């Protein structure tokens, strides 16, 4: 980016913010055309600041900023409305999505399709759609859009996945068919998944309960791998207050 670049009226969402000096904030935003951007919101904590009450997570904003270093200067933010406030489990699911973006998405790497998937997930949570389904779709979009590679409809050798075959899902390679594998074998192994589940995931169809259960186990395993052992605070908080969507605890 140019040292004097100015960006105006950029659609975005606040992912995270924390105090900076006496009256300011550091704000991490997910913008449509510039990806994750770190901004200094000068004076945002002052009682009369126009930014006070605007920089809310999970609300669509139009954002102006300037600067060319790692941290830009927030110039203006306008609330766009249209997104109901989240509460309860839906709110914690949204925090989980934000934490994944903060941990996995590098700064200033544009992902407009992921931005759209994130907005769709927030709207679905606000409308009371199945939290498990919303999270699985978002996790899948996240890994695919960040380029981690997630083959679902072809196996590790490039052959079409068959619905009636079970597969061992090898991270960085993909599914490997398990010949002669019983229907009930490996049901509790997150590395083993039915071909039907993989094809359902590829189609974004999570209506079948076994698909939803197996996709949850597979996505958790993949995400833990790409997090490199980092623990998600949102998951810890969720499991202390509720059973995380898809968990039995």
Image (tube, rainbow, N blue to C red):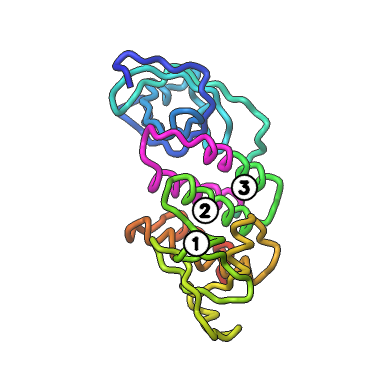
Tell me, for residue 219, which label it has, or none. 1
Element marked by disc 1: helix
Question: Residue at image x 37%, y 31%?
Answer: 38
Question: Residue at image x 45%, y 66%?
Answer: 157
Residue 172, given in percent of the width and then of the height, sits at 38, 61
Residue 70, given in percent of the width and then of the height, sits at 29, 28
Q: Tell me: residue 233, above or below residue 32.
A: below
First along the sequence among labels 1 and 3: 3
Q: Which residue is mark 3?
A: 87
Q: Tell me: residue 38, above or below residue 143.
A: above
Q: Tell me: residue 6, above or below residue 197.
A: above
First along the sequence among labels 3 and 2: 3
> Split into 4 quadrants, where in the image is the N terminus?
top left
Give the class, few, some or many, for how many residues have Cα within 10 Å of label 3's Cα (few <14, many ≥20).
few
Q: CA distance from mark 3 to mark 2?
A: 21 Å
Give the class, few, some or many, for how many residues have Cα within 10 Å of label 2's Cα (few <14, many ≥20).
many
Element marked by disc 2: helix
The residues colored magenta run 90-118
Q: Circles 1 and 2: CB distance less than 8 Å?
A: yes
Q: Which residue is mark 2?
A: 139
Give the class, few, some or many, for how many residues have Cα within 10 Å of label 1's Cα (few <14, many ≥20).
some
Residue 56, given in percent of the width and then of the height, sits at 52, 33
First along the sequence among labels 1 and 2: 2
Q: CA distance from mark 1 to mark 2?
A: 7 Å
Q: 33 or 83: nearer the eye?
A: 33
Q: CA distance from mark 1 to mark 3?
A: 25 Å
**Was residue 103 drawn as part of the magenta stretch in this picture?**
yes
Question: Residue at image x 31%, y 17%?
Answer: 2
**Was residue 80 drawn as part of the magenta stretch in this picture?**
no
């Amino acid at each position: 980016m140019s040292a004097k670049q100015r960006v105006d009226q950029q659609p975005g969402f606040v992912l995270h913010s924390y105090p900076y000096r006496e009256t300011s904030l550091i704000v991490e935003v997910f913008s449509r055309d510039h990806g994750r951007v770190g901004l200094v919101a000068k004076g945002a904590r002052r009682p009369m600041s126009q930014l006070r009450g605007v920089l809310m997570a999970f609300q669509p904003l139009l954002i102006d900023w300037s600067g060319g270093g790692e941290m830009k200067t927030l110039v203006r933010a306008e609330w766009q409305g249209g997104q109901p406030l989240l509460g309860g489990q839906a709110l914690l699911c949204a925090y989980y999505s934000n934490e994944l973006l903060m941990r996995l998405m590098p700064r200033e790497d544009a992902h407009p399709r992921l931005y759209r998937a994130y907005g769709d997930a927030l709207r679905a949570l606000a409308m009371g759609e199945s939290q498990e389904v919303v999270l699985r779709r978002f996790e899948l979009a996240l890994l695919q859009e960040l380029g981690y590679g997630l083959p679902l409809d072809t196996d590790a050798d490039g052959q079409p996945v068959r619905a009636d075959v079970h597969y061992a899902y090898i991270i960085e390679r993909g599914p490997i068919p398990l010949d002669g594998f019983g229907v009930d074998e490996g049901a509790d192994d997150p590395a083993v998944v039915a071909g039907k589940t993989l094809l359902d995931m590829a189609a974004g169809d999570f209506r079948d309960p076994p698909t939803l259960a197996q996709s949850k186990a597979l996505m958790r395993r993949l995400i833990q791998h790409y997090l490199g052992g980092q623990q998600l605070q949102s998951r810890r908080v969720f499991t202390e207050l509720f059973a995380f969507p898809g968990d039995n605890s």
